[in-house]
Image (tube, grey):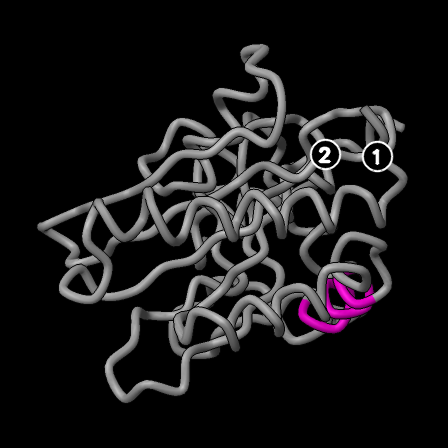
Amino acid sequence: MKALDKALDVLEYLMRKGVAGVTEISNELNLNKNNVFRILVTFEEHRLIEKEEETDKYKLSTGCVVLGYGFIHKHPLTKLSAPVLKTLRFRLGETVNLAMLDEKQQYVIYVASEETIKPVKVKSRIGRRYSINSSVSSSKAIRKALKGEAGFVFDYEYDERSGISGGACVIRDYKGRPIGSVEVIAPLYRLSLKTIEEEIRPLLEDAALDISLKLGYWD
């Protein structure tokens, strides 16, 4: 199992870093170079990583995408959330995201989205991972829930530097545990704080409740 732990540490490091060589991985993870090389070769044979010919460094390959796609589209949260996201996007006309809390409760990962059809839109967050301590609304809402705040916790983001505004509500599983969030984001000029609080928040709370009930939640 220790060998498997080391191999997964290497894969996770590449996920975080993007591109890295044998020496760098060895130094950062305190692993023997030969072990790192064997791990990388094994992952390459299984098409989970690939080697850049120009730099001799390694990066994740499409095999990881296939694995991630299979996980996301078969997970109950994404399957049961799909119609709710579509309805919410139709009602608001803005991008609606679904974020999932990782098992270690360290990150929120964006796993599904219904994008606005408006010409000006926020850059997609699909596939992106944010620290639970980040300032995106999903991280903020889930962080509050993990600290014990009850119900379908809401929080917002209104960032003049990035030009993004929006809000998110926590989704809970059948045991009442926070497992993700439903989120609406848009360019700053389209969503004022008043609009977020008075119009977006009630619809997000309803959507979070709807998804949670589909997952077996019952207070």
Q: Residue at x 53, y 29 (%)?
A: 153
- Figure label count: 2
Front position in the image: 43 or 166: 166
Q: Residue at x 47, y 76 (%)?
A: 115
Question: Given the image, on which type of amino acid does mark 1 rest?
Answer: Tyr
Q: Which residue is mark 2?
A: 172
Residue 75 place in picture, x, y as percent: 83, 56
Q: Is residue 121 left or right of residue 61?
A: left
Per the picture, the main secondary structure of the magenta-coloured stretch is: helix
Q: Secondary structure at mark 1?
A: loop
Q: Residue furthest top?
A: 148
Question: Given the image, on which type of amino acid does mark 2 rest?
Answer: Arg
Residue 170 place in picture, x, y as percent: 58, 36
Please identify the quarter of the rendering in which residue 104 is found: top right
Residue 74 place in picture, x, y as percent: 86, 63
* Magenta stretch: includes residue 160: no
Is 103 above or below relative to 198? Answer: above
Is 3 above or below relative to 138? Answer: above
* Magenta stretch: includes residue 66: yes
Q: Residue at x 39, y 46 (%)?
A: 167
Dots 1, 2 in contact, CB < 8 A: yes
Residue 118 place in picture, x, y as percent: 32, 85
Q: Which residue is mark 1?
A: 217
Front position in the image: 112 or 88: 88
The span picked out in magenta is 65-73
Q: Earlier in the sequence, mark 1 or mark 2?
A: 2
Structural crowding at the residue carrying mark 2, measured as other residues with C-alpha within 10 Å and reported as few (<14), some (14–19) or many (≥20): many
Is 65 above or below relative to 179? Answer: below
Please identify the quarter of the rendering in which residue 205 is found: top right
